[in-house]
Image (spheres, rainbow, N blue to C red):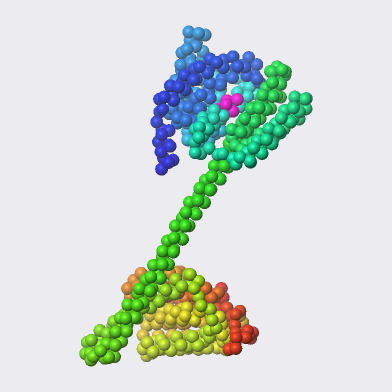
Amino acid sequence: MMKQKDTHTHSHIRWGLVASSVAAYVVMGALVSNIPNPMFPDAILALNMIVIVIAGYFGGPHTGALVGLLGTLCNFLIKIPLIGFDPYEAAAILPHTCMGFVAGRVGETRSRIGTALTVLVGHGLNLLFFVPLGLLPVSMLFSAILWTGLLAEVAVGLILTALIIGIVQYLPYLRGGRQLRIPERRKFILVASLIAAFTVILGLAFLGGITLAAYLFVLPVMLAAVALGFLEAWLTGVLLSILLGRAALELGLDAATQEVSLLLMLNLIALALGELAETLHQQRQLAQARMEELREAYQALAQADHLKSEMIQNISHEFRTPLSMILGYNELLFTGTLGSIGAQQEKALKVMHRQGWQLAYLVEQITVLHQVEQGNLSWQPVSLETLARDRVERFQERVDLTKWPLHFEVEGDLPVLEADSECLSRALNALLDNAIKFSPDGGRVNVRLWPNHDKVFLTVEDQGIGIPKDKHTLIFNRFYQVDGSMTRRFGGLGTGLAVVREVVHAHGGDVWVTSSEGEGSTFGFWLPLQHTHDSRGIPIELPPVAQPAFADQGRS
């Protein structure tokens, strides 16, 4: 939204800025008419061109173009009664208009140096108009003096444009704006002192006749730019430029080519490094702001997670008590303890009992997920064989074995391992419930358990509807259903396999599935045995045991 707002602002003409800039262009043109170009004899520095660029930067492309048009036109008209018709000023009207527009476009990126470089566009367009109109001989295009003087004028214009834009931008900060970067006091004093000392030493060396010192003037400028900022680098460059300028005045412009070149180079380096340092500082501020946003978002997520945990805990507690009462009274009614019942009542009570236990099972799954997520596991010696056999026997009591025959097989001797028996029971319940739920009548369910080196494996194989291979990595996610219609057809919230994965992962193991659509499924997991004990609590070593081929998939 901010970017759109800025662009919209730049697309309109700022008449106050246009009027003041046109006046500044005309006045500055008169003031600099006697400033010679240090690299081009008998030529002046047309520095009033920078007014157009600055207007484009702050006012946008249309404002910049209008300043270029009106400013050059006014300057042309004013010169007529003073010096007569000026063809150069007339030919510059269109190039300066284009320069102002380009400066406005580049200025929308808020790049000081990028905008200042549009001075080069203005000079280039001037050449394109001056040569065809005969205002500049073609032979001059092959003169090194022309290009040296042009580059000097461009460099001066670039330096002044970037500095003026930077100073105008910094004025609100110097009056107490919130965005002003105030360095730490000790750091500022230390770095400023170092830069000042370095500047004085190099200045004295240069005044003492050591030419090399002039080439080293760039070092304090670099230090000021990187350590402090844009304005500090410019001020350091200004101080050293005074020394170079003084030497140039003493030698005269004809003999001071080297000093002038060094002066321009020094200021350009100050601008470039200052711009780079400020960009890096802005990026660091942006990164810090993003980090603060991420920290706040993390705190909000942590708070939401805490509220979620409390809600799950409350739901679990509040559901368990009424469910226990409902199921308890249902049992009393069903057994006739509270009086005889008819066949219709018995049928209704069976439905109530089945649905009540289904609801209790769902609450149990959500409770286990919360318990594992919080790391509230109760570690104790557990016999996985006993635990698995008990779960299978309980399911054999609950289901019709003529429809879903359950088969339990153990290979090898299984040691006792450290685990949370309650959570593992819930995981086994989920696997068995899943196998029976998705198996057709008569579908056999096989439970196999075996050790292998430092792991113990368990698989539950069914002859159910199977799972597409592209869903294998998704079915263990919380609340995931392979097909939304399955929720209505088979019931459940999609938490069973999530319980299996999170319980197994909490014990340091892993889960896997092998399945094809319409061909049944084999779900399995393995648990590590590095913390194993015998019946007396003494650690034991496991002998190598052959592993069935399909269990290799559990290792990947």
Residue in the picture at 43% in, 37% down: 6
Q: Position of residue 145 (x, y in %)?
A: 66, 21
Q: Name the residue at 66% across, 27% down.
A: 239
In-front residue for pair 152/550: 152
Q: Nearer the viewer, residue 20 or 437?
A: 20
Q: Is residue 422 toward the left or the right of residue 548 in the image?
A: left
Q: Is residue 449 visible?
A: no
- The verdict on residue 250 being magenta is no
Q: Quadrant of residue 124?
A: top right
Magenta region: 156-161
Residue at the spot x=78%, y=25% of the render?
209
Quadrant of res 278: top right
Q: Quadrant of the C terminus?
A: bottom right
> Which residue is farthest front?
186
Q: Considering only vertical position in the picture, is 355 above or below 302?
A: below
Res 111 seen here:
yes
For the point 44% across and 20% down, the residue is 70
Q: Residue 297: x percent and y percent? A: 46, 55
